[in-house]
């Protein structure tokens, strides 16, 4: 459909509408908070989300062997490199998948370092052949950097700083929020990750509780794991606070959305930290509670979002 659009701007609109559908389908929470961004920045964020969602689905849900997953990721990375080398959006649409055509346009327009997406794909490759992480620092350096921190950097380049001298602080806030969000997601998905052969809980924390190898079918491990989850939930909370501290480093037209993201995911993190049901239960935040975390003065945007007007 996008290829039938003769004007780059019309084609861009077609592709970003599809990216918006990807976001709406896979992440209710992030879809809600991004409705508070100005339209041009929101479209770029939607293009970013689609570009990171596809590789994530390759390693999470595609019925492929690890070798085939790595082959798909390699081909995807080659398309990304080709997209960056092409001169126009129309040329990209003719040569690479539309999601990557749009994402490459964002990378070029916003001067995002192209290597950041390579780091993201490296993290996805690690998911195809998972290995344990010795400590929280190792988890952050060896996995979260690629899976979440660089994604936060993508967004920082789109959002922009409040002043030229504030961009380093905006990147610092993006790093903190990326770590916080990824830790919260890990804590929510312990059971799902175990079924995929992955353990994102640092081994030193498991060993501290006398757990040599994670096994959620072992009832004796469940109360011990509550302590591990509480420790990591507290670590995530520290990063949410750090991200909030640097909120004013971002352009004013993006702060409402960033604050809403912090507030909504912080609710989830706190529910996990105090959950009595532990890792056998996938915690979530009820929609009414998500709404309470959003700015009431902006509620009018939400019905429009669900009918496709935003």
Image (cartoon, rainbow, N blue to C red):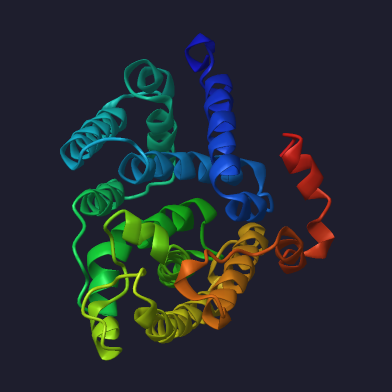
Q: Is residue 220 left or right of residue 197?
A: right
Q: Quadrant of residue 257?
A: bottom right
Q: Is residue 169 visible?
A: no
Front residue of 37/186: it is 186
219 and 57: which is toward the camera: 219
**Which residue is depicted at the point 66% across and 52% down?**
32
The percent coordinates of residue 186 (x first, y second) are 41, 66
Residue located 47% across and 13% down the image: 3
> Going by the image, does 306 lie left or right of 162?
right
**Residue 27's spot in the image, x, y percent?**
56, 49
Residue 13 in the image: above or below residue 241: above
Q: Is residue 14 above or below residue 125?
A: above
In the foreground, 69 or 54: 69
Task: Give the x, y percent position of residue 278.
Answer: 49, 75
Residue 72, image x, y percentages = 24, 33
Which image quadrant for residue 142?
bottom left
Tell me, yes or no, if residue 288 can be seen here.
yes
Left or right: 25 in relation to 219: right
Residue nearest the observer in this picture, 176 or 247:
176
Residue at the left extreme of this rendering: 67
At 27% across and 29% down in the image, what residue appears?
Answer: 79
Number of marks drawn: 0
């Amino acid at each position: 459909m996008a290829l039938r659009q003769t004007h780059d701007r019309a084609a861009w609109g077609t592709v970003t509408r599809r990216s918006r559908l990807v976001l709406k389908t896979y992440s209710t929470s992030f879809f809600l908070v991004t409705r508070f961004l100005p339209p041009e920045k929101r479209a770029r964020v939607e293009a970013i989300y689609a570009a990171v969602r596809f590789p994530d689905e390759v390693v999470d849900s595609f019925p492929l062997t690890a070798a085939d997953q790595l082959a798909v990721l390699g081909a995807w990375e080659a398309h990304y490199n080709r997209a960056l080398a092409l001169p126009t959006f129309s040329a990209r649409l003719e040569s690479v998948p539309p999601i990557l055509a749009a994402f490459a346009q964002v990378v070029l327009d916003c001067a995002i370092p192209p290597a950041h997406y390579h780091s993201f794909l490296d993290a996805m490759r690690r998911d195809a052949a998972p290995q344990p992480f010795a400590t929280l620092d190792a988890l952050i350096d060896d996995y979260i950097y690629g899976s979440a921190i660089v994604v936060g950097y993508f967004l920082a380049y789109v959002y922009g700083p409040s002043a030229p001298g504030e961009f380093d602080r905006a990147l610092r806030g993006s790093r903190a929020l990326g770590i916080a969000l990824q830790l919260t997601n890990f804590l929510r998905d312990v059971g799902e990750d175990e079924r995929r052969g992955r353990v994102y809980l640092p081994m030193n924390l498991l060993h501290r509780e006398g757990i040599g190898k994670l096994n959620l079918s072992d009832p004796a491990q469940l109360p011990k794991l509550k302590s591990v989850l509480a420790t990591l939930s507290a670590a995530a909370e520290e990063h949410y606070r750090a991200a909030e501290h640097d909120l004013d480093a971002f352009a004013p037209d993006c702060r409402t959305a960033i604050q809403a993201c912090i507030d909504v995911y912080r609710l989830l993190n706190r529910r996990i930290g105090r959950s009595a049901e532990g890792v056998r239960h996938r915690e979530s935040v009820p929609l009414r509670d998500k709404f309470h975390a959003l700015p009431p003065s902006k509620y009018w945007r939400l019905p429009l979002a669900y009918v496709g007007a935003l």
